[in-house]
């Protein structure tokens, strides 16, 4: 799936754009299938806004966002749900887990949401093992540490089929060793699907072999 | 539709914590409403069955002879008691009318007389006729052709009863007569008019309960009126109406409004039916009102459940849960209760029906021990209404819990 950002300006950023150059806002950006894209964005430049916009959580922008040439605004809730189950996956900056569910249930939710399921229960164990959270799978998400929750959210995002994986500061609370393991798992899963990724963070990094760098 | 693992996860997430006590009370209220509605339908079906069922009365049409009431003001104005073509057309157009026959009467002088001295009688008389389809009894030899001297006559059944139980008992010289005996007695019928006289040999062909009149074949009536009639034509004073439902309140009301009269015996049921109609309507109306409240309460429960879990439902939709998945989850949560209460209402009603059938059987009244099809249709309609209200409430409030 090709994602096109056609001269998008989020309403909250209007007027602020003149102050600093951006390669995304008010530009024509083409994200072609399979591309790994890094978006570097200092605080307040609309990093989370971009993520929410790509996920269609907000529609307060000028310009056009196109999924395979179709205006994202034209997607009705059922079509959007289909998109979020099969084409797009996400790791939110604020993770958005269900605190009342265990870590495993949070992951399961995304695994069984779409039928037939893309991953098996064994995949869950394998990925949890790889990220070092196998021992907390039965714990309620609300009592896990932020770093643990971050890894739960990553595994959850890898449960479904997708064309694009969107990540908003996915490693902010992980140490270098854990980052390396998470990045390796993500890269592996993206390659398995032939999928593209878009990672937004405050600073440059070398976690992945990015094809494209964007600056907010 | 919604797979089991997803369902059990949703069950953990969407848990409003609304007390089961209140939910149970709402369910009971709804159950009573459904029971009342179905009871009203079943009662109505039962009553209809008792009234029209072949076990309790003849299923064939009834015949009502209708005439205008003669009042003081009408005296001396005979034409006021005749039916105009407009009257007949109007009567014909009524929903309860299946057929209408005009009673034509003789328009000339008639006298009847016995041939035998054993049973001497002489009387002036008049005959009436109706189209053959309104004749009951044995109509095998019910015909007359010009040139035929023999004339069949139908007499009302009460004539014979009156004679046998009254006349014959009090007059020593009069024998009691069976129907067969009456049929064997020839009667001299003399017809006079337009200066001519003719004589016919009448015989009783049948007796009738239907029409209180002495009837001759329509063909004779038409011929004789032409031949001997004083006036060209005469408007009818009586009409016979064929109807499936002689106690129909609409019929009785129509006659009352027109000031027309008919056999009161046959329409007597209409008062009871009026009462039953009021009771059944009141019961049904009350049930319907309760159902509306029940539906309102249930839709409020749905609204409350969604509102109480709104952040969770919004997050579920954010993560990609389809509205249809949430919809079927919520429907599965509320519909089984509704289905169960409908089932319980039907079982209770079925029990009542069996009990009622047994009770009436002891009184020699046959009532079906099964629920009527109307009741089952009503139950299906109620179910459909509940489903529709629940479904649209769920859809509406899910849309309100969309992320953004």
Image (cartoon, coloured by chain):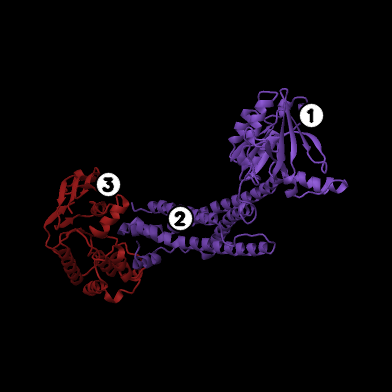
Chain colours: A red, B purple
Front position among marks 1 and 2 = 1
Q: Classify the position of the N terminus of chain A by image quarter.
A: bottom left
Q: Could you confirm whether marks 2 and 3 are on the same chain?
A: no
The percent coordinates of residue B392 (x first, y second) are 43, 51
Read off the chain for label 1.
B
Residue A39 disc label = none
Disc 2 to disc 3, C-alpha distance: 30 Å
Along the viewing direction, whichever of B29 and A36 lies nearer the viewer: B29
Disc 1 to disc 2, C-alpha distance: 63 Å
For residue B70, above or below residue A22: above
Front position among marks 3 and 1 = 1
Mark 3: few/some/many CA within 10 Å (<14, 14-19, 20+):
few
Read off the chain for label 3.
A
Front position among marks 2 and 3 = 2
| Residue named by callout 2 | B387
| Residue located 65% across and 26% down the image | B226
Q: Which element carries disc 3, helix, strand or loop?
A: helix
Along the viewing direction, whichever of B230 and B111 lies nearer the viewer: B111
Q: Which element carries disc 2, helix, strand or loop?
A: helix
| Residue named by callout 1 | B72
Mark 1: few/some/many CA within 10 Å (<14, 14-19, 20+):
few
Along the viewing direction, whichever of A215 and A199 lies nearer the viewer: A199
Read off the chain for label 2.
B
The percent coordinates of residue B154 (x first, y second) are 70, 41
| Residue named by callout 3 | A74
Q: Could you confirm whether marks 3 and 1 are on the same chain?
A: no
Which mark is first along the chain, 2 or 1? 1
For residue B282, above or below residue A169: above
């Amino acid at each position: 799936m090709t994602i096109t950002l056609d001269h998008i300006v989020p309403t909250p950023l209007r007027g602020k754009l003149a102050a600093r150059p951006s390669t995304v806002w008010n530009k024509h950006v083409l994200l072609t299938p399979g591309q790994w894209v890094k978006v570097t964005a200092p605080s307040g430049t609309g990093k989370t806004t971009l993520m929410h916009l790509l996920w269609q959580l907000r529609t307060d922008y000028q310009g056009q966002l196109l999924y395979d040439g179709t205006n994202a605004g034209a997607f009705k809730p059922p079509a959007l749900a289909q998109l979020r189950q099969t084409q797009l996956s996400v790791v939110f900056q604020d993770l958005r887990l269900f605190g009342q569910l265990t870590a495993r249930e949070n992951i399961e939710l995304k695994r069984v949401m779409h039928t037939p399921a893309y991953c098996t229960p064994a995949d869950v164990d394998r990925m949890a093992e790889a990220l070092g959270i196998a021992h907390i799978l039965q714990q309620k998400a609300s009592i896990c540490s932020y770093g643990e929750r971050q890894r739960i959210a990553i595994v959850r995002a890898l449960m479904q089929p997708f064309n694009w994986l969107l990540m908003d500061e996915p490693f902010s609370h992980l140490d270098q060793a854990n980052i390396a393991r998470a990045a390796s798992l993500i890269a592996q899963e993206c390659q398995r699907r032939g999928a593209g990724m878009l990672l937004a963070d405050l600073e440059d990094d070398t976690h992945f072999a990015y094809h494209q760098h964007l600056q907010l | 539709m919604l797979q089991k693992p997803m369902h059990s996860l949703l069950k953990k997430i969407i848990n409003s914590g609304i007390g089961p006590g209140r939910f149970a009370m709402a369910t009971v209220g709804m159950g009573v409403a459904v029971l009342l509605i179905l009871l009203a339908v079943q009662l109505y079906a039962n009553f209809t069955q008792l009234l029209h069922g072949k076990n309790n009365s003849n299923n064939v049409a009834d015949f009502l002879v209708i005439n205008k009431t003669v009042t003081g003001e009408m005296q001396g104005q005979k034409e006021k008691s005749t039916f105009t073509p407009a009257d007949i057309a109007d009567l014909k157009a009524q929903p309860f009318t299946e057929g209408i026959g005009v009673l034509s009467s003789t328009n000339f002088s008639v006298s009847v007389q016995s041939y035998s001295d054993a049973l001497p009688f002489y009387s002036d008389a008049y005959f009436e006729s109706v189209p053959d389809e309104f004749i009951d009894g044995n109509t095998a030899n019910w015909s007359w052709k010009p040139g035929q001297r023999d004339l069949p006559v139908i007499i009302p059944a009460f004539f014979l009863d009156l004679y046998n139980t009254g006349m014959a008992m009090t007059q020593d010289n009069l024998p009691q007569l069976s129907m067969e005996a009456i049929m064997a007695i020839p009667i001299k019928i003399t017809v006079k008019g337009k200066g001519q006289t003719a004589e016919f040999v009448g015989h009783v062909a049948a007796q009738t309960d239907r029409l209180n009149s002495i009837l001759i074949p329509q063909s004779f009536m038409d011929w004789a009126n032409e031949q001997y009639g004083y006036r060209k034509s005469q408007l009818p004073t009586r009409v016979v109406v064929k109807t499936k439902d002689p106690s129909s309140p609409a019929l009785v009301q129509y006659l009352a409004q027109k000031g027309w009269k008919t056999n009161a015996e046959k329409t007597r049921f209409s008062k009871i039916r009026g009462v039953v109609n009021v009771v059944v309507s009141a019961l049904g109306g009350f049930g319907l009102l309760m159902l509306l409240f029940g539906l309102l309460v249930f839709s409020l429960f749905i609204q409350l459940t969604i509102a109480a879990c709104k952040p969770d439902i919004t997050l579920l939709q954010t993560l990609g849960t389809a509205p249809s998945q949430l919809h079927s989850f919520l429907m599965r949560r509320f519909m089984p209760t509704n289905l169960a209460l409908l089932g319980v209402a039907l079982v209770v009603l079925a029990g009542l029906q069996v009990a009622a059938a047994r009770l009436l059987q002891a009184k020699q009244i046959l009532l079906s021990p099964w629920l009527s099809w109307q009741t089952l249709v009503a139950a299906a309609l109620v179910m459909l209404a509940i489903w529709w209200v629940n479904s649209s409430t769920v859809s509406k409030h899910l849309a309100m819990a969309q992320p953004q």
